[in-house]
Image (cartoon, grey):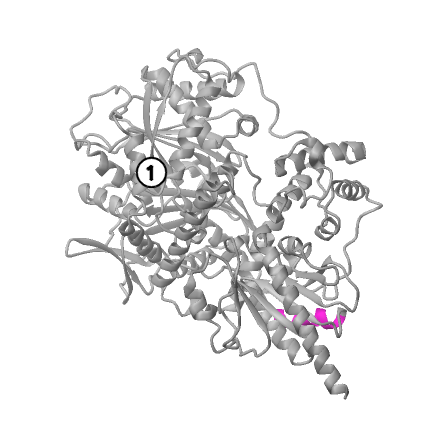
Amino acid sequence: METLKLADIVGRFPTTTAQQRFWFQEQTTPGDIELNIAIRWEVRGKFSASEIEKAVQIVTARHEMLRTRFVEIDGELWQEVVDTVRFRLGVVDLRAVAPEEHEARVAAMARELAGRPFDLSQPCLLRMSLVQLAPDRAAILIAAHHIAFDGFSIGVLGHEIGQIVQAFSEDRKPDLPELPVQYGDFALWEKELEASGALESDGFFWDEQLRDAKYFELETDFPRPAIRTTTGKTLVTPFPADFDSRMTKFNRSAGISYFTLGAAALSAALHRWSGKTDILFAAPVAGRTDIETEKLIGVFINTLAMRIHAHPDSTLIDHVLSVQEVVTKSLLHQSYPFNRIVHRLNWPRDTSRTPLASLNLNMQRVFLEERKYGAFELVSVPSHMPGVFYDMNIQIIGRNSGWKLMIDYNDGLYTAETVTQFSDLLLRTFEQILSEPNCMISSVSFERGTPAKPAAVRLDSASDPQPHLTDVHDDEIEGVVRHIWADVLGIALPDTDGDFFELGGHSLVALRMLARVQQHFGYRVPLDVFLSDPSLKSTVRTIAKGLDASSLVAKPESASPEIWDVLTLRPASAESPLIITMNQPFLYHAMARHLADDLECINLYISDTDRVTMLDNMEFDALAKAAVQVLLTRYPDRQMVIMGHCVDGLLALRMAHFLSQVSETILTVAMIDTWHPDRFVQMSRSERYRTRWMNRTRRWSHSIVQKLKGHISWKELLLRTKPGTWYLRRIGAVEQESEAYRLQMAVNHHLVRASRRGTITPYDGDVLLFKTKAHTDAALAEMFGWSGILEADTPVYALPGWHEDALLTSGVDRISKVLEAKIVRQCKTLTIKAEKNAK
């Protein structure tokens, strides 16, 4: 990379606690490379260095953190964002070098790239080189400073580079959504969060968790120097080839995550090695508890202090379950900064040791999503550790090629032989947990120098074999579906007869159920077929027919196959008023069941990913006009109510605007929690982030009250938090996001982007606004930002529940009654008007 010329400062923000921690480390040991992150990828297929360089330049322009420098002003650390930086990709061609020499040369270049200190006063703390190894293969070497980058950022960087280069090769514009916030916004929010005192309850938790804890370390082979050193080596040991399938099967049966298993195995091994029962080690967490931060490059990482008690007489499975409890509680309090914990404990400062913990554990799948991007593929390759921060950094990383145990260790403290012996013990502990979980911890064999050997007992494969289509009969299908329904609904098997929604199901539960059905049978039940008859018997018949290639259930013909599909949620006569709902058909299905028999309810929705891609090139009004065309074609001269939730409410309003120009059939428009899009565009970044934080705080308080009143379970409470949802998915307690859910989110994302590009004109027709508890009285005062666009006397109706609950049981009854009353009044008015005109 060329020398950077500093452009004008475009923003100055406070620094986060993670950045302050890394800054302090940098100042105590200037020029030390322990905070440098080394990354290595391999790119295979058709690519060019110039396209990759241009892609990184685009990523740099998107992410302010890659255009940030750090300065001290009056003793306080600030981060300053510059307008532009000049990124240059280093390129080295080794195609003329013998292939057997490639690895040594690439490794040497990686060490050199990551071995140079960064100047934190200069923006763009990122270096990258491409080493061409063959016409269709190259190594990508990356070095970044931890103050601006973390492990999760690796995946963000790789995915965006891949998408951009793929778009170049396909001669199109990259489909990268606009970033809703930048890292500086997160820093402002964190500062306000700390000032509010909202984290004090987390601090009290760590006070109690670490009360009377002792510094844990393994006996060293060499004397510990007075000043901690950071030079080290890495020992890499592969797990058995079947480790992933066996571990996945065990984790599902025990209801735990990868990390819980790793923490249990490590703590048991540390007990066997040291004889101590009070184990303490560090563990990183991504710290991205809000969906907006998942798309950002920056440092969000926090460190948890894992204090685990290991008793020799405990069985391995009991130990695993006790560790799960520690992990769960720690994750719920993960927002409290690690350096604040260190300050609260106020242990004597020791320059020869790392604060609080000498060991670190990281167990997860690799950050980079190893996948193909058009004509080329990005693959993660293990890299070296520029500097060793902990005495031992134990990394258990899963890649497509398998799982590996990597121990970065301070070679000034331990010999390679000691680390090898500990590695063997840890592998042996994993093996015994998987093969003999009912054995005691003390039974884990500990003979120095003895390598880990696979045990004779093996668990079954990770998933049950899928039935062959020709071997499946109706009674077998019914048995499987009954078990799935009983599981997702939380009811007994004999109680599964009947209507899915009357048995307690709702939209999200239905999505999980259909995903489970598809996973087991390899057949996706059509959404419209299920909603037309959501009974167990009907579902079984649909699956049976779907598995018969000669009798597939067809979807109803759509009047506009290009974008919109039409789903009838509640049929009625052709003369009845028609309620048109936009997107999220599962949610409106519940509302349709509450409507009077003489009202027809339909849903316009986007049914597949191919149609979602079409949204990229369509303006918001074009989407509304396409929906209007469907209505005019299929339902001419029908009296209509159009309604939508959130951004779909805005879509409903635009549809009504265009329909009113050619027809007088619009009775009313219903918008649920729908703000004028300019309300957010006009906000400052800090105001936007402050609003999001306040809403999150209020939402959490609302959920706590619901839990205390017994309206929701602990599991439902956890599902309302990002860390809780992540943890429940990791342990298999809830299903992963279904295809239908991801499609719904993609549609919502495209509509939000499109809505902020358009212009909203005044509408003088009848409109109903609905407000959930997610919005304060300020929403009423501002009329959701619609002053001047809607009539001044537009009513606002309050709904119970939060934003996402509006169309669940708590809100549909209220909405249905309001709509029915409005329809009756409007129809009477139209009838009287028609009679007067006839006279």
**Whole-percent x, y for residue 139 in the image:** 45, 44
**Whole-percent x, y for residue 460 in the image:** 61, 23
Location of residue 364 by image quarter? top left
Visible in this render: residue 346? yes
Residue at 32% over, 50% down: 148
In which quadrant is the C terminus drawn?
bottom right
Residue with the mark numbered 1: 303
Which stretch appears magenta? 622-633
Location of residue 838 by image quarter? bottom right
Q: Is residue 710 left or right of residue 115?
A: right
| Residue type at tag 1 | Thr
Q: Is residue 838 above or below residue 352?
A: below
In which quadrant is the N terminus drawn?
bottom left
**Whole-percent x, y for residue 785 in the image:** 46, 71
Residue at 61% over, 65% down: 643
Q: Is residue 644 above or below residue 290?
A: below
**Front residue of this view, candidates 189 and 6:** 189
Secondary structure of the residue carrying tag 1 is strand
**Front residue of this view, candidates 349 and 4:** 349
Bin the neighbour count of mark 1 within 10 Å (Cα to Cα): few under 14, some 14-19, many 20 and up: many
**Front residue of this view, candidates 52 and 294:** 294
Outermost residue, bottom side: 839
Q: Is residue 634 above or below residue 541?
A: below
Main SS of the magenta part reads: helix
Location of residue 767 by image quarter? bottom right
Visible in this render: residue 405? no
Residue 626 included in the magenta stretch of the image: yes
Q: How many marks?
A: 1
